[in-house]
Image (cartoon, helix red, strand yellow):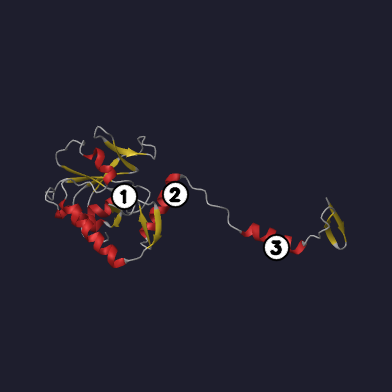
Amino acid sequence: MSYVSEKGRQNVHSKRWANEQAKAQRIEYAASVPKPMKLTKAEAIAKESKILDQRRLTYDRKRGIIELASNTHSRNRELEETIKRCINQEKPVFADDLAKFFNNIPSEKGKYIMALHGSTGSAFIYGYEIDARTLANIVKSRKDYNGKDDIVLISCNTGSEDVKKCFAQKFADAMGVRIHAPTHYGAITPWGTYYSSDLRGKKLGKFIPFEPKEGDEDT
């Protein structure tokens, strides 16, 4: 309960006088503050990918921490060793969690199947972010790729139709061959079936082909 007079507004219990000017300033400030952005989980992941694409931050997937890039030289050496690992290992699956069912995928004539984590604009090899040209160099350096087969890229959102030039298109340009990539999340079943899915593993979207564009160096 308040008592209002020419002096202002007073709480009848606490006997404290209200500072109307300060209150008005607080109300004005609150009205000027932007409303919180509400995103779905998929939208949040896409926004995270966009931030990571700026290369100002690094994402440690094992710890689940995004932090400012540091120890550049050390990270470069570690990345170089990781690239060598991807070139020399037996199967073209560059994430431990994806390797679990990768070997169950049957071979497809005229197609080279590979798996790694990805986003609309980047790919990740064992937690390290790489661009399309780097991934192309890895594949071209592997002994199991003949240089002409189509490539099936089981990598989340790399075939997204929501961006002007997604990672799969950049990869196709860098490789010079057709790339098949998921429009949403890449999933592999225990039986070796791969498909495009939503966050819960239900079928959503599809794998679509990306043809290389001659003379396009923007990879």
> Residue 190 versus residue 41: which sits nearer the camera?
190
Q: Position of residue 132 (x, y in %)?
A: 26, 56
Q: How many marks?
A: 3
Q: Residue flagged by tag 3: what amino acid is it?
A: Gln
> Residue 151 versus residue 103: which sits nearer the camera?
103
- At mark 2, the secondary structure is helix
Mark 2 or mark 3: which comes first in sequence? Answer: 3
Q: Position of residue 54 (x, y in %)?
A: 37, 61
- Real-space Cα separation, disc 1 to disc 2, in angstroms: 15 Å
The quarter of the displayed image where residue 138 is located: bottom left
Mark 1 or mark 3: which comes first in sequence? Answer: 3
Find disc 1 in the rendering and name its residue.
118
Instruction: Write the residue at 31% across / 50% down.
Output: 118
- At mark 1, the secondary structure is strand
Q: Are marks 1 and 2 in contact (CB under 8 Å)?
A: no
- Real-space Cα separation, disc 1 to disc 3, in angstroms: 47 Å
Q: Is residue 183 left or right of residue 22?
A: left
Q: Is residue 79 above or below residue 113?
A: below
Look at the image and tell me whether residue 5 can be seen: yes
Look at the image and tell me whether residue 174 can be seen: no
Instruction: Write the residue at 47% across / 45% down.
Output: 40
Find disc 3 in the rendering and name its residue.
25
- Real-space Cα separation, disc 2 to disc 3, in angstroms: 33 Å
> Residue 150 versus residue 87: which sits nearer the camera?
87
Instruction: Write the residue at 29% across / 56% down.
Output: 128
- Which residue is situated farthest in the top direction here? 191
